[in-house]
Image: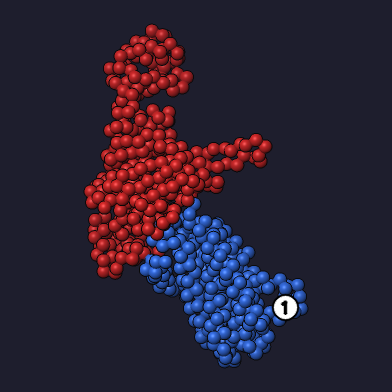
Amino acid sequence: MSVGVRTQDLRKVYNSAPPLGAAGGFVARADAKGSKPAKTDIVALNGLSLDVWPGEIFGLLGPNGAGKSTTVGVLTTRVRPTSGQAWVGEHDVWKEQAAVKYLIGVVPQRPNLDFSLTAREILIFHAAYFGIGAKQRNTLADALLEKFKLTDRANQMVRGFSGGMMQRLSIARAMMHDPQVLFLDEPSAGLDPQTRILLWEIIRDYNHAGKTVLLTTHNMEEADALCQRLAIIDHGRVIALGTPRELKHSIPGGFLLRLRFGTSTRALLERLQSLSGVREVRPSDTTGADVYADRGGSLIAEIATLAAATSSELLDVHISEPSLENLFLHHTGRSLRD
Amino acid sequence: MNWKTFGAMLARDAHVARRNALQLLFQTFLQPLLFVFIFGRVMVGSGYMPATYKSLLLPGIIAISMVFTGIWAVAMPLIAEFQWTREIEDRLLSPIDISYIAIEKVIAGMLQALVAGLAVIPLAWLVLRPGVDIHLHMPLQFIAIILLVAAFSACGGLALGCSINQQHIGLMFGMVITPMIFFGCTYYPWSALTTFPILQKLVLINPLVYASEGLRAALVPQFPHLSVIAVLCALTVFDILLLVVGLRRFESKAVS
């Protein structure tokens, strides 16, 4: 029986520096009249509501500081929300913590392995914390070490492990008690391509066994390849939600042409709008424009001609095909990499 | 309460302590034994100190060993695990109320402090002998005191470990531990401060005073010491206070 995850109107305001890995949010200044020098509050989540269905791979996509890690923190009992509610299955995360912890496995953004133990001991003690018997935990640990290609390092202290090995061991540890929902915070950050592919396979396998996976990423390729549904979040709110395909098709046209001219005139932008296939024109700064269109390269000649006609030379063009990156840009006016 | 989880966390701490046994051994016993050797053997042997000082010194050394071991065993891992390694997260995610994780740390710290306190007695006796005059007339009183001292050290470690940043570890030793040891009536009885009346009142805020005086009352009652009732009451109050503060600090560290 698969288990879903739900949040309602989550708000989280940090009044001191947020912890590492949950450094979400933007800085909002509360400047009430007559108050002391404005206190700096960091709003990490600003009314975030999500509904992750049982048995799906769900992605939270957003730039650094969007509130992804804070969302995972709230759902995994590590960050107490300022207001709002969160449930894993039928259990309220903040009222039934122990019950929720049985259901979830967590892979943090930064490795937090127990440095006083060997790789194998880490898995075995983790299972012991979950009340799994000695014989079963030994069998499970050996199987997972094998699956994650760590058998030959099983009896070494993890202090000397590479980043990729630590990440693999973190995932193995999260799977030891066979959780119904697996949370992965930026799982492929810092991994080499080979390990990343291994990781994706493991996540898909786990999902095929009926388990729910919630992962955060700012890597569009990963979100596209892995997730059945995605929420794009920014400034602690969901700004778009759907399958990767639906989301990509929600951008007008699909193609994005980022243009830069010698000088920019309002007239030129209006005339660009009249070209066939152009859906939307947005001025990006004084001399630039973002054009959303049904076609890409074939528009360039027409744009160049129009620019010349308004004595504004076309200096630079960048064409991108339908992608989540464009979607993010469309909704926020910023690149995911900003 | 999930006893399996609690037991597994204790087993983990015991496993790590066994792995670091040699290091723990030196850390716990080297300093007290050097002190015992210099003050109890060299100074007494050369006539600068009276022979009875050997017996007076021993309870203080037990108190120092226990308090230092308990604080160290609880505070140092907590400072590291909460701040830069985040190792404690695997236990914070285990299916148990998080205050029991802090209580488990206290129990593990108490056990280490008890081992340190009980092991230092024969070791110090070996260094000091002959002429050590200790007796265990009231074993129940001794057990009560030694348990309260162990609890004080572990609860103190919890409160300190959850309140201090890694960059202030040096300061913790300089500003908290060292003055506590020197003003803790460990190397002298409380009655020796009679000539410094203000200081004698001031040191009463130091829980180590009650630990040393309590052990003195239990092991060498022939020397002047604070009343056992006062010692038991004061240690109980300090234990509860430090435990409450420690649990609160732990929870605020564990959940952001």
Q: Residues within 10 Å of mark 1 (few under 14, many from 20)?
A: some
| Residue A333 figure quarter | top left
In this view, the residue in front, A202 or A153, is A202
When the figure is inspected, residue A332 is found, relative to residue A265, above or below; the finding is below
Q: Residue at x 51, y 84 (%)?
A: B123
Please provide percent x and percent y for residue A12: 49, 45
Label 1 residue SS: helix
Residue furthest top in the image: A309
| Residue B178 figure quarter | bottom right
Please provide percent x and percent y for residue A218: 37, 39
Chain B display color: blue
Quarter of the image with the N terminus of chain B in it: bottom left
Residue placed under numbered mark 1 in the picture:
B193
User: Can the viewer see residue B35 in this picture?
Assistant: no
How many numbered discs?
1
Image position of B168 (left or right of A10) = right
| Residue A306 figure quarter | top left
Residue type of the residue flagged with mark 1: Leu
Q: Residue at x 45, y 13 (%)?
A: A266
Please provide percent x and percent y for residue A278: 33, 17
Image position of A28 (left or right of A238) = right
Chain A display color: red
